Image: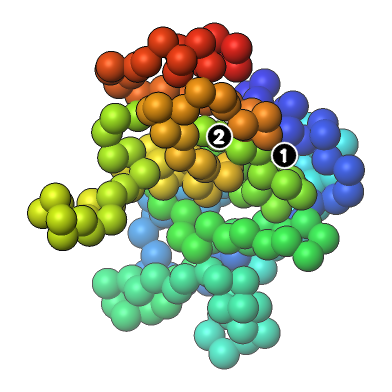
Amino acid sequence: SPGTRAILSKLEAPVKIRFYYSQGGNTVPVGLKTFAKRVEDLLGEYRAVSDAKVVIEKFNPEPDSDAEDSASLDGIDGQMTNCGEKFYLGLSVSFLDQKAAIPVLAPDRERLLEYDITRAISQVSTVKKPVVGVMSALPVLGRPLNPVLKQQPTEPWVLASELKRVFDVRKVEMETRKIDDDISVLLVIHPRNLSEETEFAIDQFV
């Protein structure tokens, strides 16, 4: 996609992708093997588009092998087949001293495969995460326990959790009169009852 190409074009040093795939398992479903081949083909496209700035290393983690030890160290999870055989299909992305892993690559997430790989590359290659401000009257970022108001704690929305994987997410109060200068993007959700000062602050930010 254009977004992936843009991120790859900005790489200042090689990114290493270590692809772990158990190729010798006879009990692994054919559909999973076919999916693994599509993953391998996509990684080849990353290497070609990046002008060799994406380096692909392939490993076959057989039982009690150095490759299996490497998979464990890189955070790749072994899956069990119906016959009790351990199977690996995952990848690790590293850039300088930064590392990110996709412990399990699953066919049911194939439509998001490019997104997951590109996000991992962006995560390790970005020295400082961009700051995203979130302004909302709703508990998008979760809510702590409040005994005074008898409010139970809530978990962050899935949207917020996904944003935190890539960005430095910061809460912006509804009553704010100035948006911090280091905020790159402001996400306003359900902007009810905004004061004139806050609306002015948003206009100035935009």
In this rendering, the answer to whether 55 lies above or below 131 is below
- Determine whether, in the image, residue 132 is placed left or right of residue 3: left
Q: Residue at x 46, y 34 (%)?
A: 172
- Determine whether, in the image, residue 65 is placed left or right of residue 111: right
- Tag 2: amino acid: Val
- Residue 129 percent coordinates (x, y): 67, 44
Q: CA distance from mark 1 to mark 2?
A: 28 Å
Q: Residue at x 87, y 36 (%)?
A: 51
- Residue 178 percent coordinates (x, y): 56, 24
Quarter of the image that includes the N terminus: top right
Give the quarter of the image for residue 159. Answer: top left
Residue 116 shows up from this direction? no
In this rendering, the answer to whether 69 lies above or below 111 is below
Residue at mark 2: 132
Using the image as rendered, state which of residue 179 and residue 80 is in the foreground: 179
Q: Residue at x 51, y 41 (%)?
A: 170
Decide which of tag 1 and tag 2 comes sooner along the chain: 1
Disc 1 packing (10 Å; few <14; some 14–19; many ≥20)? many
Residue at mark 1: 46
